[in-house]
Image (cartoon, helix red, strand yellow):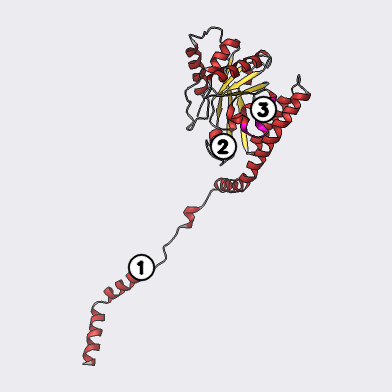
Amino acid sequence: MRKTLMLSTRITNSIMPGAIQENSKRRFTMYRVPHVNFASYKFTEEQAKRKARRFAFSAYRPILIVLIALNTAVVPATTALAAYLNSRGNWVDHISRFWGRLNLALSGVSMFVSGNEFIDENQPYIVMANHESYYDVFALIGYLPLSLKWVMKTELRRIPIFGIACEKVGHIYVDRGNSEKARKSLKAAGEKIQAGFSVVIFPEGTRSPDGRLLRFKKGGFVMALEAGVPILPVTVVGGRKILPNKSLRILPGDMKLIIHKPIPVDEYTYETREKIVERVRKAIEKDME
C-alpha cells in the first residue's frame, strides 16, 4: 500500500510539474510587498523649496498673529498721541503708512502698485475700493500716497484701544443699523474732505465672501456729490489669498493695488447717481481676478 502511494505521487509530480509551480507562484504573489516607484515621487527643486517655505510659515503663523495683534493695539494709540502733538502735521500719515507696510512685510506679502500718476496729492478724494480681506486695509493705508480718513463700521469701535484711538485720530464710524446716525457720520466725513483729507470707503459695506463685487451702497456716492470731490476707484487684488474671509490662516503671497483715473462728479446729480455708481463699479471690476 505504501509503495503504491509513493508511486502515485511520483507519477503526479512527473505529469503536472507546471501546475505545482504555478500554484507556488500564486501563493508567493499573495504575500509579495507591493513595488513602489519612488522615482515618480521626486520633487523639483522649486517644489521642495515651496513646501519648505510653507512648513516654516506654518510654524511662524502663530507668532505673526501675535505680532499683528500687538502692533495693531500700539500703533493706533501712537497715532492718537501724534495727532495731539502734531495736529497740523503729517506724523499720523507716516505712522499709519508704516503700520500698513510693516504688517504686509511681516506676512511675506509682495506689493505691486500701479496708477500713482493719476493722484494729485493736493486734491482730496473719496477713495472707493473692493473689499475681500482685512489685508486690503494694510495695502491701501500703506501704499496710497494720501492723507486718509476711513469710514468704518461702528462694531470696530468696541475693540479695546484700537476703537477709541481711531476715533481720536479722526476716522468716522458708521452705524449701519441706524440710518439717522449713518447720515450724521457721512456728514462728518464730508467735513473731513472739506478740511483737505481723502476719505476711504468700501462701497460694498462688507467683505465679499467669494471675491465677486457685492451690491454698492449709495451713501458714499451721495457724499461725493455733496462735497463735489472726485471719486478715486481702486482695485485691490490678492488679499483673499493672503487671508480668506472668516479665517486666520495667513499665507504669504502677492498683492496688487491698481489705482484708476479719478472720476469727477460734476456732471452727475442726485437723480442720476446710479450712473456714477455703475461707472465706479466697472472701473474697479475690470481689473479684479
Question: Residue 165 in magenta?
Answer: yes
The disc, 3 or 1, on the residue closer to the chain's N-terminal end is 1
- Disc sitting over residue 105 in the figure: none
Residue at 77% from the left image edge and 23% from the top image edge: 86
Q: Amino acid at mark 1?
A: Met
Kind of residue at disc 3? Cys
Q: Earlier in the sequence, mark 2 or mark 3?
A: 3
Numbered mark located on residue 242 in the image: 2
Q: Quadrant of residue 252?
A: top right
Pick whichever of labels 2 and 1 is earlier in the sequence. 1
Q: Is residue 212 above or below residue 34?
A: above
Residue 264 in sight from this viewpoint: no
CA gap between label 2 and label 1 equals 49 Å
Q: Are marks 3 and 1 in contact (CB under 8 Å)?
A: no
Query: How many angstroms separate mark 3 from mark 1 (CA)?
Result: 72 Å
Q: Percent position (x, y) of residue 130?
A: 54, 25
Residue located beneath label 1 in the image: 30
- Horizontal relation, residue 36 to residue 116: left or right: left
Q: Nearer the viewer, mark 2 or mark 3?
A: 3
